[in-house]
Amino acid sequence: MKIVIANESHFKFAQIISDTITESAKVRGTGIAKRTPEYIQKRLQNGNAIIALDGEKFAGFCYIEVWDHNKFVANSGLIVHPDYRNQGLAKKIKERIFELSREKFPEAKIFGITTGLAVMKMNYELGYKPVTFSELTTDPEFWKGCQTCKNFDVLTRTEQKMCLCTGMLFDAAAKKKEVPKKEVDSKVFKRLKNIKEQLFLKKKKKNE
């Protein structure tokens, strides 16, 4: 298995990456923004993406997005092909895209939004902390990317203050040099996710 920085030679994998993201959203039933093959190709060609390959077979992917004139970067689109799940590959990809982000944008704050408990746990172990959306980028182009998510109506109803996703942030200026290694109880994140879901279900019923 190779985990490498993507480039134009990987354009041939754009369609399967897009399809895998779409299928994952259907299976999980949670909010994952769609990504077209054309969108994926742009991320592959600028050196801001990581791709995992088993020979010539696609195994996993993640990319970097840059916002607010390099003040913020997001590690987005983390996906593992079904054939390679439950093997620890997602964590390896996450660690490599995090390293690449720090190498290319050492002064930037690294953030992400997710509903996935596993991703929350990986982020926490890398040094991220849960934050309110107000601490993330205000760039409208970032939030426009949420329009294809099934929970976008929740984001708009709350005036972009919160959603079913949890915002997480790594602030290089406020962190120690060593990445924290301690384990975190995933029940904490699960509890947070359940609270959010219950809150917005109540609001939705009330609005209806």
Image (tube, grey):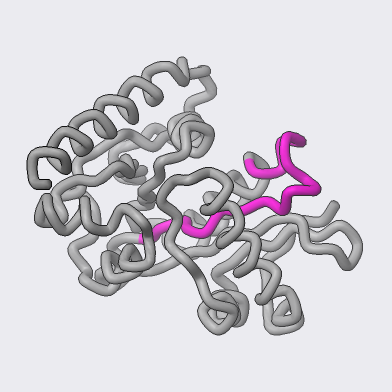
Up the image or down, 147 lies above or below 164; here it is below
Give the total number of marks visible in the rendering.
0
Q: Magenta part of the protein: which range?
A: 73-90
Relative to 208, 58 lies left or right: right
Q: Which residue shows up at 34% across the image and 58% down it?
A: 108
Tell whether 163 sits left or right of 110: left
Q: Is residue 79 magenta?
A: yes
The residue lying furthest to the front in this view is: 208
Q: Nearer the viewer, residue 130 or 172?
A: 130
Residue 75 in the image: x percent, y percent? 47, 56
Q: Locate residue 139 relative to residue 54 in the image: left or right.
A: left
Q: Is residue 203 above or below residue 68?
A: above
- Horizontal and vertical percent position of residue 99: 56, 51
Vertical side of 53 occupied by 124: above or below: above
Q: Quadrant of residue 177?
A: top left
Instruction: Where is residue 81? Give x, y as percent.
Output: 72, 53
Residue shown at the point (20%, 48%) measured from the top left = 133
For this rendering, which residue is in front, 201 or 15? 201
Image point (55%, 84%), residue name: 38
Q: Within the magenta stretch, is there residue 9?
A: no
Q: Quadrant of residue 10?
A: bottom right
| Residue beneath the point at 25% across and 69% down | 68
Q: Position of residue 137 (x, y in %)?
A: 23, 60
